[in-house]
Amino acid sequence: MIEADLILKNAILLTMDQDFNQYDPGAIAILGNSILAVGKEKDILAAYTSKDLMDCDGKVLMPGLVNAHTHVPMNLLRGLADDLRLDVWLMGYMMPVEREFVSPEFVRLGTQLACAEMIRSGVTTFADMYYFEEDIAKATAEIGMRALCAQSVMKFPTPDAQFYEQGLEMSRDFIKRWKDHDLIIPSVAPHAPYTCPPEILKAASALAVEFDVPLHTHISETSLEVENMRKEQGMPVVPYVKKQNLFEAKVLAAHCVYVDEGEMRTMQHLGVGVAHNPSSNLKLASGVAPIKSMLEIGLNVGIGTDGAASNNDLDMFEEIRLASFLQKGVSGDPTTLPARESLLMGTRLGAQAMHIGHLTGSLETGKRADLILVDLTPLHNNPQFKHNPLGVYAQLVYAAKAADVSDVMVNGKWLMRQRNLLNLDEKEIIRHSQEYAKKIDAFLIERESSVLSKLVAIGGAAEEESFEIQIKVRVKDTAPIYKALQSPKIEIIRKRHYREFDLYFFFKDVEQGMLRYREDEFLSPENKIEKVRSRLTLIGQTLEDRFPQEVLLSRSRYIADATQSPRFYREYFKPHQEKEIEKDRVRFLVNYEGFEFFINIDEIKKPALGYFLEVKSRTWSRQDAEEKSTLVTRLIEFLGGDLNETTSDDYIEMVK
């Protein structure tokens, strides 16, 4: 007889192999970290012997579940911001908090919290994508789980990299050091096509190909992402990333909610694995991925929880059940994605989607000993029928719960026995997690009270000069102004023509000032749009002074590029009131008597207020502002403006 290190017997054994072999009672022999043999109990006990013989008491013995897409440290952000759109949730809350708090210590604690939860719900393998990924790998390996750990790279500064080249170099170093680890598969993760320009996508793919490791990314998660790609690149997301050589690597693509049949066939042909995330996609209202079609075409489709910040748990039993129900619901066909196929996605297909199907995902000779025991005796699992061999799959998918998992083994070592975690101190993890929660709470409470803090949090805000002087007059005829601008007393430095669309946000606390979202259309001499620029400006409400002839001195502003839609900023800043202005503006930057001024010739079209001549200048110096205040009145008169027609109201104050 052949000596094994461990034999598990008296189990309902589901192999999840190509033939879906079942053995009842079944047994499995384990040697080291691998499976020595699987089969009927009588056959295994006749051929193998072991000093360690374990009776499974009729529990289901099956492969450990495979969580094909998650962000494990985000367990520390569970419940941070809910019931928001994806862009507001990600850009407005997750990323600002991550920039403030994510560190090696943060990701290690978050990984411990997540691994404890996943082990308790029967997960033995997961695919992660986050920052400080090597620290995540270290924590995971210490705990004993198997993971595809992918270092995130994107065009924005991240908690661990100020620029994308640094992120790519971190990925290279991480992959080189961990390439042959027994539990960790190191990887690179260009976050998504909308956060990674072609240079990142191509470089990440080349890196993954060089070291023959998988590449983990997000693809076609939302309809907005797809619409923007079509608008900007003239093609859907999948053809675009293919053009950037992304699919030369072994890609694991998360979400894929909005892909058509042609894109699915492209992915199948190029061996792309898909990670379906039903709870996250529903919670963020991203949509329902066409999983039935993907499976029919032959794609390897796994199931993921996504991060706990957008789910809000890592319960794979819940995800597997929901995946089945969703496809039935959207297809109107109750036979769509039956229980066995849904469970397959949570085991072998998930491993294949991660490009590690040769290691795990099914119970077969030679594969790693990654397995779980599931107790079917609790009340919610009874009674049990035996007439249909498919019944046990339905029992697991439609009735079983994460709490029914009693034992978990990874790589031939127990991580949980009789619901007791062996390598983790849950009480300490929870205590440290709550300490982080208090710090993050304090940060958000302070930030939410300030529009400026919220603007700074989403990145890119810069302070303009502290003081702005301005004077404007109503005019009936703009011709004299253009004629005066030809005078040698005025040096024209620059001229531009715009159409400007302004959306002002007002807040109940007037001391917050007002936030302006502006879209500038730059017009050519033929009045054709040459480019479009969007900006945010936080305008202080304080009027510092009023000089003679209605010259205003006001606190200036903070500006930031507006990279999101007005709808994003409306939901993020939560204004009390909104007003709109549309104008045609010809702007001159001029030198007059040794000082620079902006001269705006404006036609206010919405509301129809007519024509105005406006002169402005900005400065850091109040003394400089006072000197310029006398010059602006002379400049207005020189341009033909009537000082009796000056107004101290800004355009937005004229809007009823």
Image (cartoon, rainbow, N blue to C red):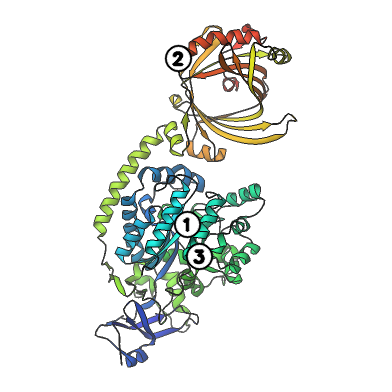
Can I make out residue 310 in this image? no
The quadrant of the image that shows the C terminus is top right
Q: Residue at x 61, y 70 (%)?
A: 297
Say the numbered circle drawn on residue 622: 2
- Quick check: 235 above or below 447? below
Q: Position of residue 284 (x, y in %)?
A: 50, 51
Label annotation for residue 189: 1
Asked whether residue 228 is in view, the answer is: yes
Please state which amino acid type lies under the numbered disc 2: Arg
Residue at 48% x, 26% y is 464
First in residue order: circle 1 vs circle 2: 1
Quadrant for the N terminus, please: bottom left
| In front: label 1 or label 3 | 1
Which residue is drawn at the image coordinates 61% and 48% (left, top)? 228
Q: Which residue is mark 3?
A: 323
Q: Is residue 329 left or right of residue 446?
A: right
